[in-house]
Image: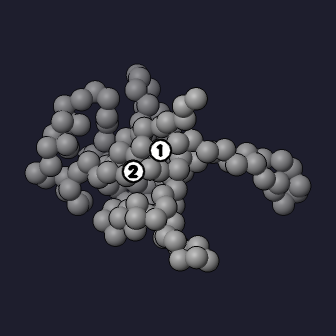
Amino acid sequence: MLNSVVIIGRLVADPEHRETNTGKGVANMRIAVDRKGREKETDFFSVTAWGQTADFVCTYLQKGRLVAVQGRLQVRSYKDKENVQRQSYEIVADSVQPLDSRKDGVGSPMVAAAAESDEISDPFAD
């Protein structure tokens, strides 16, 4: 069996960092990923990173950065305040890699390659 997810998109907000009771770092973030097609549609994914990956994300990444996330899809079931059964989907990241330089993206070969590709569109471009 295989549960593997790879997405490339932009951080919607700065990652949120917290620690567990045992001191392990956890980062939560939202990633916007454009769909390919005539009509511009965007999907928003919740991503959770743990340990060193969480520390890296919170130290070096901020809102608007283009990132590649590799991990697995996780489904959690819970009951809401009205006692209704709900499901939540999130990506648990094994790795998060920046694909641009801080803020402006100038000088990064990954940004140049992404700009030439039809697969990635920049929702923050003017």
Q: Determine the residue positioned at 29% across, 52% down.
A: 98
Say which amino acid is labelled 1: Gly
Asked if one can make out residue 58 in the rendered structure from this viewpoint, the answer is: no
**Element marked by disc 2:** strand
Q: Determine the residue positioned at 53% across, 50% down.
A: 92
Residue 4 locus on image (x, y percent) = 49, 36
Say which amino acid is labelled 2: Ser
Earlier sequence position, callout 1 versus callout 2: 1
Residue 104 locus on image (x, y percent) = 19, 56
Residue 45 locus on image (x, y percent) = 52, 46
User: Mark 2: few, some, or many residues within 10 Å (few <14, many ≥20)?
Assistant: some
> Closer to the camera, 105 or 79?
79
Task: For the N terminus, give its image quadrant.
Answer: top right
Asked if one can make out residue 106 in the rendered structure from this viewpoint, the answer is: yes
Q: Which residue is the site of mark 2?
A: 95
> Closer to the camera, 106 or 6?
6
> Closer to the camera, 65 or 26?
26
Q: Determine the residue positioned at 30% across, 65% down.
A: 60
CB within 8 Å, label 1 to label 2: yes
Query: Which labelled disc corresponds to residue 100?
Result: none
Q: Which residue is the site of mark 1?
A: 71
